Structure formats: C-alpha cells, structure tokens
Image (tube, rainbow, N blue to C red):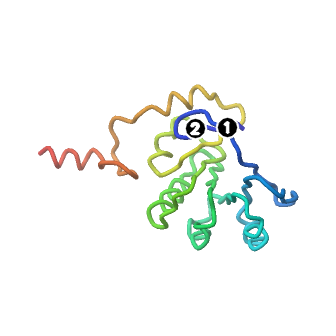
Amino acid sequence: MPLVKDGRPAEDTWTTLADDAPLPAVGAVIVSLARWRAEREALLARGGPLGVRLPSDALADAVAADLARLALVAVEFPKYRDGRSFSTARRLRDQHGFAGEIRAVGDVLPDQHQFLRRCGVDSVELPAGADAEAWLAAAGPMSVAYQAALGDGGPLGLLRRRVA
C-alpha cells in the first residue's frame, strides 16, 4: 500500500505480518495486538524494529507498558466514520508520551488527514485504490481549528478570548 508520512509520499519500510506468518530474522515488522500478547517475549528477543497494530476497540493502555520497546503503533480504522482510533492516537501521545511513529491504517479519507495529524498520527497507509494526489493535497496547513491539537497554539475559541 502507498504511504503518506508527514504529508509527503514515503517508502514503507515496515512489513505487516499475519498472525500465522513466520517471523523474519531481520527487518521492521508490525504484528497484531493478539500476536503481540501471545509472542511478546519472542518478538522482543528478535531485536529488530517492532510495531503493534491496535484494533479500534483496543485502548492505548493495551500497549502502554511496552511503548518504550515499540517503534510504531498502527491504529486501525475499520470504517471511516469510526473515530475511536483518533482517541487512541491522542492518548498514546498525551497520556503515555509515545514518541515513536503512529500510523493510521484501514478505511480513512483524505478529508481526515489534518484531523489525524492533529491527534498525533505521523503516517497513513492509504487504502487500496486511494488517490495519492488527494491525500497530498489534503496535507496542506489547516488555517483555523475549533479543537485543541498536539503542538498547537490552541483552538479558535482560545484565540477569540485572547483577542477580546
């Protein structure tokens, strides 16, 4: 799948493994939360870059204790209108201090790109058949926002209060 990282096309250096796929000796891998729980020690002993894919019904707390060992957390969007993974990404950054890559995977729309970024998502694995140009166009700056974001000066409501 094509990848957009920090608003630009990027090469995906990660391999997403199925739960029954053999674990490669080298390379960056993303495993499901179920596989992470079942094979945690073996995955950590491998020593390569490791990522975990969180389903939308899993909370950030599911991997919080191991975030220092993870280089990437992929948050799933089973449907574009399912917003639980926005909250998961935000909690990974705000409450758990995760400094690694957060990747959105699944059914996401270009219109959601800025909202993903505002919640701490670094990269988006584009859905099959997605128009990469639409994603790149959506990566432009958002001039006005009504909610607070990570690394932001504040929402429009706070700006109005400062000016008044």
Pick the residue in front: 11 or 35: 11
User: How much space separates mark 1 and mark 2, taking CA atoms?
Assistant: 20 Å
Give residue 83's position: percent from left, percent from top.
Answer: 54, 52
Relative to 77, is 41 above or below?
below
Residue depicted at x 48% and y 64%: 97
Which element type, helix, strand or loop, lies under badge 2?
Answer: loop
The circle drawn on residue 56 is none
152 to the left or right of 96: left
Query: Can you tell which of label 1 and label 2 is closer to the viewer?
Result: 1
Q: Which residue is mark 2?
A: 109
Which element type, helix, strand or loop, lies under badge 1?
Answer: loop
Pointer 1 and pointer 2: residues touching (CB < 8 Å)?
no
Q: Which residue is mark 1?
A: 11
Tally the numbered discs: 2
Nearest to N terminus: mark 1 or mark 2 = 1
Q: Look at label 1 and name its amino acid.
A: Glu
Q: Look at label 2 and name its amino acid.
A: Leu
Relative to 40, is 147 above or below?
above
Pick the residue in front: 122 or 89: 122
